[in-house]
Structures are given as structure tokens and as C-alpha cells.
Image: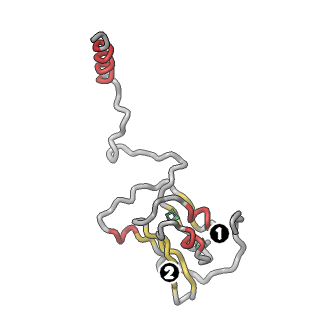
Amino acid sequence: MNFMPKILRGVVSYVFKKPVTKQYPLERVEPAPVFRGKMSFNPDLCVGCGMCARDCPTGAITMEFYPHVKRKMPKFYYGLCIFCHQCVESCAWNAIKPTTQFELATYDKKQLIERVSEQEVKPVKPRRPEKKLFYR
Ligand code: SF4
Ligand code: SF4
């Protein structure tokens, strides 16, 4: 029973301390810089090689064909994505970049699909990869 005063002292001290949790979403929470969030895709850098779709472990990326320019581009479905960022690693042309964006909750699953519109797709210009991948 002699431990009761110690416990009570601890409980009372917490009544006067500031809460450690934040009132999200009323109070904005900034994720750590290394947090793996949604990716950003730059269609101007993509050459349509399909390595991102090949290496994605969950099948969240499919390659979509654009007949007017006769080339493929990745289509992302964030409903399947586990944010492992393997696609960022696999893209030797740096067309996929990591971001810390995490607020993706929606009632409409269609909003989780990210694809490039026909107007944004330009004919592919051959160029060298920007980074070397050790497993190729
Ligand atoms: S982050 Fe991972 S799961 Fe999501 S699209 Fe890229 S490779 Fe696929
Ligand atoms: S790996 Fe990069 S260049 Fe290749 S299809 Fe994916 S985004 Fe485009």
C-alpha cells in the first residue's frame, strides 16, 4: 500500500501537463522528412520502360497505352499501394519522386487513380537513364 502516494503523485502531475498528442486534423501534423507518402510522377521524364510496374510488389501500377503517340505510361492506383517506394528506386529516369503527402482518405475509389491525360502525353524522346541500378 505504500506505493499508492507515489502513483497518486504521478496521476496528479499529469493533470497539469500539456497533452503530447495533437488535435489532428484541427492541428496540422507535419510528417518526418523520411516519411514515405504518395509519389509524384513527371510524365515529361518518363520513357515508358515499364520497370516501375514490373517491380511494384502489389500491382498498384499498370502501364496504359496511348495510341495517339504510340507509347505507354504508368497508371497508379493508390488503393493498392503500400508506399514502399520501390517504384522510385526502379525508375532510372527519375520520373517518380517521393513525397510526404499522406492525406489520401476518400469515399470515392476513383479519386485514388492517378493517370496522365491524353493531352499531357508527348512523344517519347530517347535519352540515357539518370541513375544506374545495381540489379540490371
Ligand atoms: S510505392 Fe510500392 S506499392 Fe506503391 S506503387 Fe510504388 S512500388 Fe507499388
Ligand atoms: S520506370 Fe520510370 S521511365 Fe519507366 S515507365 Fe516507370 S515512370 Fe516511366
Residue 127, x across and y down, in percent: 71, 76
For this view, does 96 lie left or right of residue 76?
A: right
Ligand 2 image position (quadrant): bottom right
Q: Looking at this rendering, what residue extends furthest in the front direction?
A: 1
Please tell me which of labels 2 and 1 falls first in the chain: 2
The residue singled out by tag 2 in the image is 64
Q: Quadrant of residue 7?
A: top left
Name the amino acid, label 2.
Answer: Glu
Q: Residues within 10 Å of mark 2 (few under 14, many from 20)?
A: some
- Depth check, front residue: 114 or 83: 83
For this view, does 10 lie left or right of residue 37?
A: left
Q: Secondary structure at mark 2?
A: strand
For this view, does 1 lie left or right of residue 69?
A: left
Up the image or down, 91 lies above or below 124; here it is: above
- Depth check, front residue: 36 or 57: 57
Q: Residue at x 38, y 33 (%)?
A: 20
Name the amino acid, label 1.
Answer: Trp
Up the image or down, 126 lies above or below 29; here it is: below
The residue singled out by tag 1 in the image is 93
Residue 44, x across and y down, in percent: 59, 73
Residue 57, x across and y down, in percent: 51, 66
Q: Quadrant of residue 88?
A: bottom right
Q: Residue at x 32, y 41 (%)?
A: 23
